[in-house]
């Protein structure tokens, strides 16, 4: 593992009014590493990645990315330094076509009399190339996304982040709408991204996906890290116990987590 | 999941581009049918003069409909356009008018009145537009409420400024745009055409236009993609205000003055034109070519009723029915799209 972490989350806390969604989370991600983030609903996974992606601001704690402490004011800021995010609820404009969505916020332009003008043909060609490289077939790139299936939409999002690259990719349940074959392809995509030295945080509910692709499995429970384990050194059973809180804390979790004392089943 | 479901066999697929084209340009087809019908049944309707008149008459509603469309595409709306137009017209008339409540300001050389009055009209429009935008974005007040308030206080200000009196007698420098012709076509009509071409280009071919559609379609996704949503929305309101200011300036020039109730009812005509033109009130959908056809359609009906010598209130009834028909048509179009695309 390389010495320098790509992303270091240090003692992040986040409160929404009286509710403490994150209670001191510390986590790092290295270049070319896939970290699967697991946890029950409401464990704080989405809140955590939204902070890293610049969509939410933490109440306290630090986010160090690429060796520099970051204070993202918007998702645009995070994107500008190479953090790509694929959200659970799709981030597509279904009223527009595939090409427009692929280049959302990064349109290719040329200057005509000082005015930026869209280069539609170039964008269409590049989208076609990127989708073909990702093995996705969409009949017409000029189709509005609302006329596409859930799987096709997700494929656009996945291909979008692969194409734009960046240094860190956050995938928030990216395969939720996918069929078996498409999920397999999606996992291959994650593999390819890792091979390019990009760090990946993969949020998922599906144990098999985590074990199939992740280098490390991090379990969150009630706003804190319940376990941080190398994939090869753990088992689905152990992870399930961590998720449900039926086991003492294992691994390099930085902060003690309250667990129910009556359940003492050790790994 | 089967790979890439082909939507509905090979038959309809061949006609899809044709069908899509017809659906996208349905308003133009309706306009063509209406004009043909008027030409067949109304004597003396088929004249160049009448068509130019329709075009010229469309200018004021047409220009404010562009601003309304911009804000609707971004998922907002701007009800203030009519009052901003009246406000701009009244300010120009009060400053330069020679009769009634007019201040009778004279500039040397006299042609200076032209750019100065235009700058005033655009300036007041930009100011109200920016205020609307800021209230919507910074204070997160619903655009309907914000611009309804502007619609009301704007008209109130027009009445207050004029003291209820009318203004007449504008200098020739200001009248030019309303009376001159270029290549046999009234300048007002040229202005309308140029405004539509420019803003159709802005919406379809520039990142700003595309981002407005994205914001109207999915503001959260736009923000996540790094698009500066607040800035773009404020800009849309600002442009809408400036267009209303321009319409007011043209209207003052055309009527050679201003009255306290100048342009009342144009908001609803603009709204009707925009809806008939296929702009969705839910945001993210619409094209200015459709809006242009919608404006021309309304104006044609008005002209036809005038030429036939029917009482003008029929115009309003027909326009109201047209709006309903347009919405129904839109639903039908969407159903058709869903089954064929």
Image (cartoon, rainbow, N blue to C red):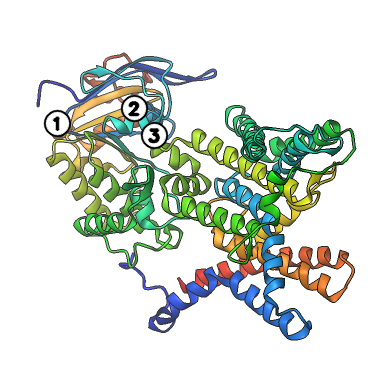
Task: Characterize the local packing of mark 2: few (<14), some (14-19) or many (20 or more) Cα atoms within 10 angstroms.
Answer: many
Q: Which image quadrant: the C terminus of chain B?
A: bottom left
Q: Residue at x 30, y 14 (%)?
A: A255
Q: What residue does disc 1 label?
A: A233
Which quadrant of the structure image shows residue A220? top left
Q: What residue does disc 2 label?
A: A52
Q: Are marks 3 and 2 on the same chain?
A: yes
On the image, the x and y values in percent for residue A119 come to 32, 53
**Residue at the extreme front of the image, as rendered:** B109
Q: Earlier in the sequence, mark 3 or mark 2?
A: 3
Q: Earlier in the sequence, mark 3 or mark 1?
A: 3
Nearer-the-camera pick, A195 or B34: B34
In this view, the mark in front (3 or 2): 2
- Secondary structure beneath dot 1 equals helix
Task: Characterize the local packing of mark 3: few (<14), some (14-19) or many (20 or more) Cα atoms within 10 angstroms.
Answer: some
Which quadrant of the structure image shows residue A167? top left
On the image, the x and y values in percent for residue A65 come to 25, 23
Q: Residue at x 58, y 37 (%)?
A: B238
Which labelled disc corresponds to residue B97?
none
> Are dots 3 and 1 in contact, CB under 8 Å?
no
Compared to A253, does B166 lie above or below? Answer: below
């Amino acid at each position: 593992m390389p010495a320098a972490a790509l992303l270091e989350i240090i003692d992040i806390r986040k409160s929404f009014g009286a509710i403490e969604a994150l209670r001191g989370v510390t986590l790092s991600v290295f270049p070319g590493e896939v970290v699967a983030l697991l946890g029950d609903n409401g464990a704080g996974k989405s809140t955590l990645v939204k902070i890293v992606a610049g969509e939410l601001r933490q109440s306290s704690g630090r986010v160090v990315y690429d060796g520099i402490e970051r204070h993202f004011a918007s998702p645009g800021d995070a994107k500008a330094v190479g953090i790509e995010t694929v959200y659970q609820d799709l981030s597509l404009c279904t009223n527009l076509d595939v090409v427009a969505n692929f280049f959302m916020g990064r349109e290719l332009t040329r200057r005509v009399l000082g005015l930026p003008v869209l280069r539609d043909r170039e964008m269409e060609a590049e989208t076609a190339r990127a989708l073909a490289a990702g093995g996705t077939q969409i009949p017409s790139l000029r189709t509005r996304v609302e006329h596409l299936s859930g799987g096709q939409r997700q494929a656009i999002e996945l291909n979008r982040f692969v194409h734009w690259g960046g240094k860190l990719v956050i995938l928030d349940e990216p395969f939720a709408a996918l069929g078996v074959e498409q999920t397999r392809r999606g996992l291959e995509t994650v593999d390819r991204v890792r091979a390019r030295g990009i760090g990946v945080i993969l949020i998922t509910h599906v144990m098999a996906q985590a074990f199939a692709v992740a280098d490390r499995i991090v379990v969150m429970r009630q706003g804190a890290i319940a376990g941080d384990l190398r994939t090869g050194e753990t088992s689905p059973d152990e992870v399930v116990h961590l998720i449900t809180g039926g086991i003492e804390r294992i691994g390099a979790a930085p902060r003690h987590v309250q667990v129910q004392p009556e359940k003492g089943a050790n790994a | 999941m089967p790979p890439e479901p082909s939507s509905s066999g090979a038959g309809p697929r061949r006609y899809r581009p044709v069908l899509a084209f017809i659906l996208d340009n349905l308003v133009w087809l309706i306009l063509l049918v209406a004009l043909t019908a008027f030409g067949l049944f109304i004597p003396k309707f088929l004249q160049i003069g009448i068509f130019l008149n329709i075009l010229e008459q469309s200018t004021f509603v047409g220009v404010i409909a562009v601003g309304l469309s911009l804000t609707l595409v971004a998922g907002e709306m701007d009800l203030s356009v009519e009052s901003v137009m009246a406000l701009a017209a009244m300010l120009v008339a009060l400053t330069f008018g020679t009769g009634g409540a007019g201040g009778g300001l004279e500039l040397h050389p006299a042609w200076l009145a032209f750019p100065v009055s235009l700058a005033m009209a655009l300036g007041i429009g930009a100011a109200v537009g920016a205020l609307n935008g800021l209230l919507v974005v910074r204070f997160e007040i619903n655009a309907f409420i914000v611009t309804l308030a502007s619609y009301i206080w704007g008209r109130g200000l027009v009445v207050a400024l004029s003291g209820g009196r009318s203004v007449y007698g504008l200098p020739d420098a200001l009248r030019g745009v309303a009376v001159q012709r270029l290549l046999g076509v009234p300048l007002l009509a040229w202005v309308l055409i140029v405004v539509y071409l420019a803003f159709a280009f802005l919406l379809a071919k520039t990142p700003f236009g595309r981002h407005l559609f994205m914001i109207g379609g999915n503001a959260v996704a736009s923000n996540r993609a790094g698009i500066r949503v607040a800035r773009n929305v404020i800009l849309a309101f600002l442009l809408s205000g400036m267009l209303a200011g321009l319409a007011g300036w043209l209207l003052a020039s055309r009527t050679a003055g201003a009255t306290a109730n100048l342009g009342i009812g144009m908001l609803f005509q603009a709204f009707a034109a925009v809806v008939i033109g296929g702009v969705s009130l839910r945001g993210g959908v619409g094209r200015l070519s459709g809006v242009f056809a919608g404006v021309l359609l309304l104006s044609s009906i008005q002209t036809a009723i005038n030429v036939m010598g029917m009482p003008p209130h029929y115009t309003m009834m027909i326009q109201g029915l047209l709006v309903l028909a347009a919405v129904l048509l839109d639903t039908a179009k969407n159903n058709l799209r869903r089954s064929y695309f």
